[in-house]
Image (spheres, coloured by chain):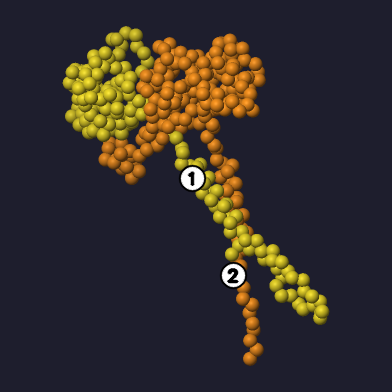
Chain colours: A orange, B yellow
């Protein structure tokens, strides 16, 4: 009997579509990921049980590191432009349009007004610049009048006239309470009493009133 | 596994004497590429969703010039918590600061719950007074404790001189630096 001799083949599995999908997903994630803007301050926020999602739009954020250095950042470049123009006029900073442009492009700023021009005039290609940006001394805010932060807040409110501005405070675990209080003071002087504190999420502890309420909401009881 | 096989295998026989050119395999092993692809996917999935910060509401009262405009606190409903050095918490009930007691962040919850159960909910007001040695974390933890225990009325107030002295004495006695 003639036998048909089958050639032995390794089972060929065409992976091409699989790879296509994999890279499609990959490119989606790469494009959808928004990297954290580089900040000169490293802040580890405390945890809270709050479930409010941090608003990303219309945010005026004051960050404080553990040494009490204060930095200001604003999410919207258009608004940043307005803010710096306002400050330039009200505080007579004498900034050139190029320096203002640098401010619009920078993530956050934390120097006294008299050093602001110097900071913004730094050459981004200079290897020293990065170190100097990291060494900003923070916005002074250490007195009952709210210090220079008061003017930042005031001009930010002016620049945002009419619309709701979310005031975020992002402080480090080990920031001292007086530093935090000074910031609240600067806001209070501007008649701002509602804040959002940036925190990391955490579950409500077992057996507490909040945990019970949340459980009821999930199961739909009244 | 992953391969694009374009090699024709054994085709028809060519004429005698025609030397068959050795065909080079065009198979590309895609496995490492796929591995890397999925590694990156995993990386992006983890980094993009994990770090979603939340926000905590904080409403501060407006500064009132006249003391009579301020809300009065009933003695039976007042519970004052003071935040001291080294994550130590001091508290007293009512309006007499000399009845100061020491607690930690772990034990203060039981005290709050006990107070909440023994007091008319309408009267209960928790007053948080961080000292200058308290950290921001202490403050947020304590505000969070209010949310956790569903305390409806609470306020963050500056510490008074008397209370500060009392804490200093207590801290000195307990040897807290």
Locate the C terminus of chain B and report the quarter of the image it occupies.
top left
Q: Quadrant of residue A95?
A: top right
For disc 2, the marked residue is A11
Q: Chain of mark 1?
A: B
* Residue at left offset 61%, top offset 12%: A94
Q: Is residue B174 left or right of residue B19?
A: left
Parent chain of label 2: A
Is A142 rendered above or below residue A169? above
- Numbered label tally: 2
Q: Residues within 10 Å of mark 1 (few under 14, many from 20)?
A: few
Q: Residue at x 29, y 28 (%)?
A: B87
Closest to the observer, A77 or A10 = A10
Can the viewer see residue B140? Answer: no
Question: In x, y percent, where is residue A51?
Answer: 40, 35
Can you see residue A123?
yes
Q: Is residue B19 left or right of residue B42?
A: right
Provide the secondary structure element on which disc 1 rests: helix
Label 1 belongs to which residue? B46
B169 or B53, which is in the foreground? B169
Image coords of residue B104 (percent x, y): 25, 30
């Amino acid at each position: 009997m003639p036998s048909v001799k089958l050639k032995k083949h390794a089972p060929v599995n065409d992976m091409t579509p699989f790879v296509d999908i994999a890279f499609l997903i990959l490119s989606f994630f790469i494009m959808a990921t928004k990297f954290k803007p580089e900040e000169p301050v490293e802040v580890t926020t405390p945890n809270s049980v709050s479930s409010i999602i941090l608003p990303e739009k219309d945010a005026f954020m004051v960050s404080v590191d553990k040494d009490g250095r204060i930095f200001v950042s604003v999410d919207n470049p258009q608004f940043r432009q307005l803010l710096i123009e306002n400050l330039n006029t009200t505080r007579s900073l004498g900034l050139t349009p190029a320096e203002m442009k640098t401010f619009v492009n920078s993530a956050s700023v934390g120097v006294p007004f008299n050093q602001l021009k110097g900071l913004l005039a730094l050459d981004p290609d200079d290897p020293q610049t990065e170190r100097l940006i990291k060494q900003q001394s923070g916005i002074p805010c250490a007195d009952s009048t709210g210090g220079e932060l008061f003017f930042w807040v005031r001009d930010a409110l002016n620049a945002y006239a009419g619309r709701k501005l979310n005031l975020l405070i992002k402080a480090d675990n080990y920031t001292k309470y007086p530093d935090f209080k000074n910031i609240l003071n600067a806001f209070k002087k501007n008649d701002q009493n509602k804040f959002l504190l940036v925190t990391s999420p955490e579950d409500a502890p077992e057996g507490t009133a909040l945990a019970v309420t949340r459980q009821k909401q999930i199961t739909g009881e009244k | 596994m992953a391969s694009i096989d374009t090699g024709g295998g054994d085709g028809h026989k060519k004429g005698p004497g025609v030397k068959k050119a050795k065909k080079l395999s065009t198979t590309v092993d895609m496995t490492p590429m796929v591995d890397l692809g999925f590694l990156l996917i995993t990386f992006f999935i983890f980094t993009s969703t994990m770090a979603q910060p939340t926000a905590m509401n904080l409403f501060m009262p407006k500064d009132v010039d006249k003391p009579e405009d301020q809300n009065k606190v009933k003695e039976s409903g007042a519970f004052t918590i003071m935040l001291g050095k080294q994550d130590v918490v001091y508290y007293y009930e009512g309006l007499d600061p000399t009845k100061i007691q020491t607690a930690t962040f772990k034990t203060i919850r039981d005290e709050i719950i006990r107070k909440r159960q023994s007091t008319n909910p309408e009267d209960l007001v928790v007053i948080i007074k961080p000292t200058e040695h308290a950290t921001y974390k202490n403050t947020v933890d304590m505000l969070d404790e209010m949310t956790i225990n569903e305390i409806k009325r609470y306020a963050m107030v500056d510490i008074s001189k008397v209370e500060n002295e009392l804490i200093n004495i207590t801290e000195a006695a307990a040897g807290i630096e």
